Amino acid sequence: MLNTYFRVIVGTFVLLSVVLAVFVHINWLWFTVFIGFNLIQSAFTKWCLLETILMKLGVKKDGGGCAI
């Protein structure tokens, strides 16, 4: 379930930042860069702030999603 929430939130943030860059100001693309940097960082460190926040909110970290 955690994997599903994570993917939905990150995907929403990326799409939102692109829409804001097109319709508000191009500097919103820095938000997309920040998201990408954090995804790369979490691959190496095995720590992600969004995962920590979701777990504190009560989202279960179990199998599911794409992990079989």
Image (tube, rainbow, N blue to C red):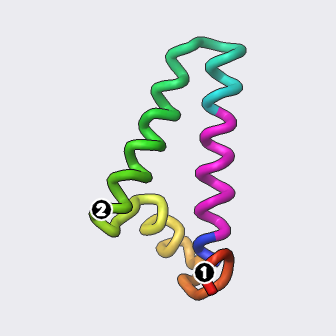
The tag on residue 44 is: 2
Is 54 above or below relative to 61?
Answer: above
Badge 2 or badge 1: first in the primary sequence: 2
> Depth check: 2 or 41 in front?
41
Inspect the image, locate mark 1, and give the three-letter code of the amino acid beneath it: Ala
Provide the residue span drawn in magenta: 4-16
Is 34 above or below relative to 47?
Answer: above
Left of 45 or right of it: where is 61?
A: right
> Depth check: 44 or 50 in front?
44
Left of 52 or right of it: where is 16?
A: right
| Image coordinates for residue 45, horizontal then vertical, percent | 28, 64
Q: Main secondary structure of the magenta part?
A: helix
> Depth check: 39 or 1 in front?
39
Q: Which residue is mark 1?
A: 67
Q: Quadrant of residue 66?
A: bottom right
| Image coordinates for residue 59, horizontal then vertical, percent | 59, 77
Please give the count of numbered marks on the rendered protein: 2
Inspect the image, locate mark 2, and give the three-letter code of the amino acid beneath it: Phe
At 50% from the left and 74% from the top, the residue drawn is 55
Q: Say which element carries label 1.
A: loop
Judge whether residue 7 is colored magenta. yes
At 63% from the left and 60% from the top, the residue drawn is 7
